[in-house]
Image: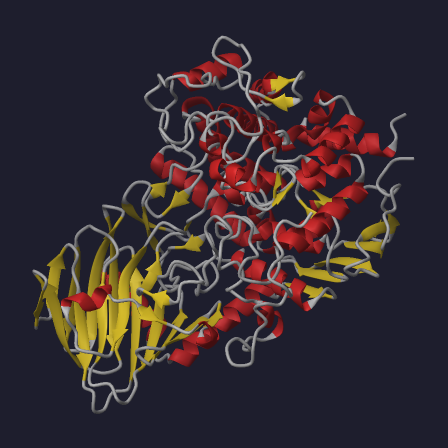
Amino acid sequence: MLNTKSKLLTIIHHFIGCIIFLFFGINNVLAQDEYTNNDGKGNLKYVDPRIGNVGQLLQPTRPTVQQPNQLIRMYPKRNDYIDDQIASFPLSIVSHRLGEVFSLKPWDKEVYPGSWKQKQTYDHDLEVTRPWYYSTFLVDDEITVEFTAGKKAGIFRFNFPSKSSRRSLLFDVYNSGPASWKFINGNVIEGMETYHDDIKIYLYGKFSSKGQTGIIKNDQMVNSDETQGKDVRSWITFASNNVENVEFKYAISYISEEQAQKNFHSEMDGKSFNDIKEEGEKAWDKAINNIKVEGGTEAQRRSFYTAYYRCNERMVDITEDGRYYSGFDKKIHETKRPFYVDDWTWDTYLALHPLRAIVNPVMESDMANSYVTMYEQGGWMPTFPVLFGDHACMNGFHSSIMLLDDYRKGIRDFDVRKAYEGMMKNATQATMLPWRNGPKTELDVFYYANGYYPALKAGGRETVPEVHPFEKRQAVAVTLGASYDDWAVGEMAGELGKQDDKAKFTVRSLNYKKLWNNDVGMFMPKDSSGSWINIDPKFDGGMGGRDYYDENNGWTYLWQVQEDVPGLIKLMGGNIPFENKLDQLFREPLGRSKHEFWAKFPDATGLVGEYSMGNEPSFHIPYLYNFTSPWKAQKHIRLLLDLWYKDNVFSIPGDEDGGGMSAFVVFSSMGFYPVTPGVPVYTIGSPVFSKVTIDLENGKQFTMIANNCSVINKYIQSAKMNGQTLNMPWFTHEQLVNGGTLELEMGPKPNKSWGIDP
């Protein structure tokens, strides 16, 4: 008779077939001081958008001001938090790290052609950064800049010094395509900027006072109300004797000039700066206060709620009065549902979409529906959908996993059969080449026939023209990712009663085994003849290991089998070798200096041994201890959160990517995590809070109680689910959404028998 743990593995198999940096002293480096950041009610007071604003090696977070999941986004144009100069203020960030539109800058001196290129110094300590409000003081100019965001509209407010002889606003564009500016009656402005070569974005705005207008033509100052062309610049100057405060209200449209004006009137008519600011604060209050925590330190609450704020930045709703522009077919469409863009699924399928499936399943449903709509319009199921279409980035068709995960969690208000059609088309007709979109290539045909992506030998010359010259084949990473994607297609086929498809893709989901090299104990590359390519999985493969892996080395990709962990354990020889290998991962030396390692693997940040906390494929790895010794998962999760997610400007160990990394912080701080998206089961870690309450959309609450929880008391002594003894480190999504209560007894030393079958 099967024991409890074996039963659990059977159930799961049914579903799935050291401190490196000392962060400059105290945790609370960015403690909210009385002057700058003390506003915000409830848990909003813990949100600090400055957290992570200085990247260790990679991209920092930005202090984004917007309403949750809405189109208008703003942060000052500067390198990062360390940079003390601002180049301009965008009227909107169009896409996460993919550009902005309409540049604005206040100017209190005589305007000349070089004014637009001048940067302006600000004082960090006089900057206010809240999710719904931003203010800074330009110290050389003595101008105060304030901003607050609506949904498709925003307001800037400028306070000029009384001694200024001139008070102007300078307008510019960020993109190289055709653009235009037009002033009307001295207090209205209309603009157009072309984003990504062919997308016209429209602006309509009003100033609180009338002014004299001008443009730059042939690098000369011209008094005019209108200009069009490329690299267009314009300005408006207000009378100095009676205007110290200038307010600029505006709205943006991806549809038309007329729609920009409609957006303006619908959001701005009769509204003051403070009205819009208050609306934004209320929107954020609603967005993040559906999770309430008790206990923990103030630093942990700041890290947690700031991470949760990041989880509500993307995707963004671009519908305007029941219409939207689609970059997938370059047309305007009518809709009765929100249409969302700006998602990087390689980053977000792991934790962000699963988090939203809990806290906002209606929005997640609309996002899934948007994916299906994009497939209908563009012909492929997208993986990195942005305003201009599917951005060819990273590898894998992980939207298949996202859609399966939603479906199995009861989120089904989208055309499921059309979604499956798109998943199937990607799996059988699209190229799997990294950073490429389009039809299959000879390498994909080889994969279908042989079950792995063929790699080139070291120094081999690329013969397939479609291969990206920098991103390379990533042969092992592509094979492992495709196995998970194919598993998702097969599982969705089973859900829809398509048994032949399920059988076919269940076989394909086991392709990962074809690259397992038992002698090396790693997933290793093979060439097209089926011969092993002898490499050092720690360091070979060129920049980022991209010949074979992707951004990480073989130690990270050793664990990329979330869909079949029992199968991976079997490959490694059983539980004991599996656990030993996990131990080794966190202890394995780099074998070279850090600067030599990071010169080749700059994305593999947040290192503990060979484990990279700063890259998304690593998120689930510490939770794999729950298959053998759960106390080790508890130990490592607490260590990783404490090491790499402090509440200061250095605290995000890798590219945050608009919620992808922050969702790991939210889940792990609450004490559980979705190891295998697509399987509606959560595994238990070590919560940092003594109590977590999640308000669910069905009116119920999920509660996690961790008695005696503290910085020291991180180990689970015993557990109950809904009052019943829980001897397994797992619970289901159904238990969560039905309003379950998970109760943990915590202590300072591990209970090594909890979660382990007797």
Describe residue 539's horizontal placement relative to residue 197 as left or right. right
* Residue for point 55% across, 16% down: 534
Q: Count numbered badges in the picture.
A: 0
Viewer-proximal residue, 624 or 386? 624
Tell me, what colour scheme is on the image? secondary structure
Rendered image quadrant of residue 621: top right
Vertical side of 514 occupied by 601: above or below: below
* Residue for point 62% across, 67% down: 28
Vertical side of 424 occupied by 99: above or below: below
Viewer-proximal residue, 676 or 739? 676
Rendered image quadrant of residue 16: top right
Viewer-proximal residue, 32 or 674? 32
In the rendering, at what x and y percent does residue 318 appear? 38, 55
Residue 219 in sight in this render: yes
In the rendering, at what x and y percent does residue 207 appear? 25, 77
Rendered image quadrant of residue 518: top right
Viewer-proximal residue, 429 or 641? 641
In the rendering, at what x and y percent does residue 6 appear? 82, 29
Q: Quadrant of the C terminus?
A: top right
Outermost residue, bottom direction? 241
Q: Quadrant of the N terminus?
A: top right
In the rendering, at what x and y percent does residue 551 appear? 50, 36
Outermost residue, front direction? 593
Outermost residue, top direction? 529
Residue 358 in sight in this render: no
Vertical side of 61 occupied by 235: above or below: below
* Residue for point 47% across, 54% down: 60
* Residue for point 49% across, 59% down: 53
